[in-house]
Amino acid sequence: MAMVTLAPGTSAPARVEKDPLAGMTVLEPDAVEGAPAPKGIRITRNALKRIRVAMAKEGITPDAGGLRVGITGGGCSGLSYNIRFDSKARDRDRTYLFGQDLETPGDPSGARAVRIFVDPKSFLYLAGMVLDFEETLMRQGFNFINPNSTKSCGCGSSFSA
């Protein structure tokens, strides 16, 4: 085991934190329906493309539904992320519109906006979050880059705030 000692009058080296959004194109919502908030939900261009492809695969047009993003109790860190398609917003939901007139490669929607629904309880934990989609040799799936998360599990599907 190696030991590091500091000479009197010196400080520890500065800790360099990696920016989780480095190299990503993060999209701000085109519009927000429901109670606006200073910190909303944002998505990356990769997530927009994947949402459009998945909606087309499920036969859901952007006009007929959207993606519901939320949290539930459970998981190894206390709260779990969940996403699913929903046909419409519920009362008190915040609805975010993304990607109007923004083409993505292989875009089956014709550059129409996608809607993301967030219920008020989930919004408490998701405000300021960026939804990304990662596709590598080792992993394929949505990433939740959440500033409210104090710790998360190894797979990234649960967190605590």
Image (spheres, rainbow, N blue to C red):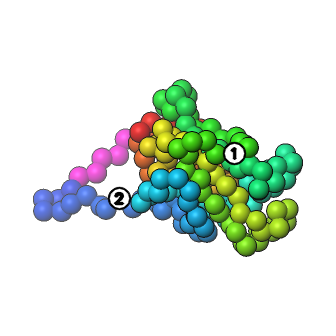
Start-end of magenta stretch: 1-5
Tell me what residue is drawn at x 63 percent, y 55 percent: 132
- The kind of residue on which mark 2 rests is Arg
Q: Is residue 157 above or below residue 11?
A: above
Residue 11 picture location, percent across and down: 21, 60
Kindly identify which numbered label has been placed on residue 15: 2
Q: Earlier in the sequence, mark 2 or mark 1?
A: 2
28, 22: nearer the viewer? 28
Mark 1 — residue? 88
Q: Is residue 56 visible?
A: yes
120, 82: nearer the viewer? 120
Tell me what residue is drawn at x 61 percent, y 41 percent: 90
Residue 7 picture location, percent across and down: 17, 59
Residue 139 picture location, percent across and down: 71, 47
Residue 57 picture location, percent across and down: 86, 49
Q: Determine which quarter of the picture holds residue 88.
A: top right
